Amino acid sequence: MTALTLKHLRYFDALAGHRHFGRAAEASAISQPALSLQIKELERILGATLVERGPRQIRLTPLGEDFAIRARSIMRAVDELAGLAQTAAGPLSGRLRLGIIPTIAPYLLPRLLQRLPERLPGLDLRPREAVTQKLVRDLVEGRLDLALVALPVSEPSLEETPLFAEAFLLVRNLSAARLPVPALTDLQHLPLLLLEEGHCFRDQALAACKLPRTPNGEIIEGSSLTTLVQMVGAGIGVTLIPEMAARVEARSAPVVIDRLAEPAPGRTVGLVWRRSTPLADHYTALSRIFREELMPAIAEI
């Protein structure tokens, strides 16, 4: 009889995380038929069905849901054992799974991908872009090592390390260039463009404008900061963007970008990782490198 192996658990963990054979196979760097074969073998070993297979999606059986929790716990422990060995191997090296939110990724990730190999040549950075809620879940469950997000995330099992603070800037159509910059409270009375539900920057912008999370006023949603700025350029309304996005987005549409009166709203960007990781000292050192590499990029804006 074939024995249950860590490979079986890792493939099932990928399937449980993605709930899709194709995406799980891609994340596991194997073909979809090979992944399906591994899951069938796992079910044969256990003598039970873990996955309900449909034409468009899969569902875990009740046993599959319980098994996924146990498998994730085992894989997290295995990863931490590997991390424990890595602490004795010198500078941070090997695979580093970095989560990064969409309102940071386009503006800072290219610089990190360019500069980190010079600072840490043995590091294999694997970035993944997603909203904060998903990154925090994947981090807690061991599918990510670090995440670059807006703080705080307020998850007790995670360590938070601030890197820098930045202001939110007001974006108006170019026709408003000679008009006074409105006060922050006046934005409540203007057509306001916001990111769609799920983005933490949406909640931060609403809080800055002193609006409820489900405002009754005229709110228009977009899927990215670029979309919002293009809509402002088309004369649809106004929006807020983080300072790091200003240079890139101002080139792409007929808009004017202004600083709001003090105290201006803003956010703190930082790294988060699991408190239980044996690589905490390495990640603390890495946070200093991130700060050194990213602060000049912010200062240039």
Image (cartoon, rainbow, N blue to C red):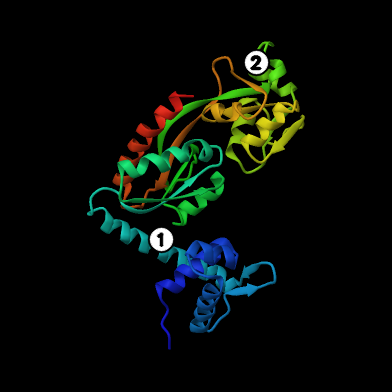
Q: In this view, does 240 lie to the left or right of 25?
A: right
Residue at 26% of width from left, 53% of height from top? Answer: 87
Q: In this view, does 205 lie above or below 121?
A: above
Residue at 56% of width from left, 41% of height from top? Answer: 102
Asked whether the viewer can see residue 159, the reply is no
Q: Quadrant of residue 289?
A: top left
**Gap between marks 1 and 2 measured at Cα:** 48 Å
Q: What element carries label 2?
A: loop
- Residue 1, percent from left and from top: 43, 89
- Residue 151, percent from left and from top: 48, 36
Of 246 and 90, nearer the camera is 246
Residue at 30% of width from left, 49% of height from top? Answer: 92
* Residue that extends furthest to the bottom in the rendered view of this protein: 1
- Residue 189, percent from left and from top: 74, 21
Q: In this view, does 85 lie to the left or right of 104?
A: left
Q: What element carries label 1?
A: helix
Residue identifier under label 1? 76
Of 237 and 251, nearer the camera is 251
- Residue 285, percent from left and from top: 30, 40
- Residue flagged by tag 2: what amino acid is it? Ala
Residue identifier under label 2? 183
Neighbourhood count class around disc 2 (C-alpha, 10 Å): few under 14, some 14–19, many 20 upward: few
Q: In this view, does 56 lie above or below 99?
A: below
- Residue flagged by tag 1: what amino acid is it? Arg
Q: In this view, does 197 lie to the left or right of 295?
A: right
**Mark with earlier residue (1, 2):** 1
Asked whether the viewer can see residue 197, the reply is yes
